[in-house]
Amino acid sequence: MRVMVMVKATAESEAGEMPKEQLLADMLAYNEQLVKAGIMLVGDGLRPSNTGKRIRFQGDKRTVIDGPFAETKELIAGFWVWQVRSMEEAVEWAKRCPNPMEGTSEIEIRPFFEAEDFGAEFTPELRAKEQRLRQEAAALSQ
């Protein structure tokens, strides 16, 4: 199963405070363990929300909202995508993570939808198209 592991933002990360050398070294060592175990597919940190945009959809109307965004506790400072056998395995790996922030921090783990989750509505034709698009996207990232 694939999961997204999200590091929640803090007031410090939203203020643009960069991690200290020791935390960077600890996180790189942790990422190395994830890669060697075949768990980590991708991972990255995100800039503060004042550099971002949101697009609000209302029917066919689109509204662009500039950051920063309120409710820091709902924002994401970084993420990984992991391939694990179960949610329990993801939790065990997350518990090994160095504290990703200087103070109190939080990590959220959420599973991805898989093709079978969509049932009959996800027709063989749509599945084939999705597979082709995934292959094209993977080729672009290489």
Image: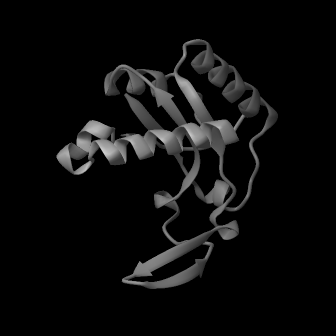
Q: How many marks?
A: 0
Query: Is residue 83 shown left or right of residue 89?
Result: right
Foreground pick, 118 / 135: 135
- 52 w.r.t. 85: above or below: below
Residue at screen point 67% across, 60% down: 48
Residue at screen point 60% across, 34% down: 42
Spot occupied by residue 7 in the image (x, y as percentages of width and height): 53, 44
Residue at screen point 74% across, 53% down: 17
Spot occupied by residue 122 in the image (x, y as percentages of width and height): 27, 47
Which residue occupies the extreme front position in the image? 125
Foreground pick, 23 / 69: 69
> On the rendered image, what quadrant is the N terminus found in?
top left
Query: Is residue 142 shown left or right of residue 36?
Result: right
- 70 w.r.t. 25: above or below: below
Quadrant in the picture for residue 101: top right
Query: Is residue 26 shown left or right of residue 70?
Result: right
Foreground pick, 69 / 113: 113
Foreground pick, 75 / 17: 75
Quadrant in the picture for residue 131: top left
- 64 w.r.t. 79: above or below: below
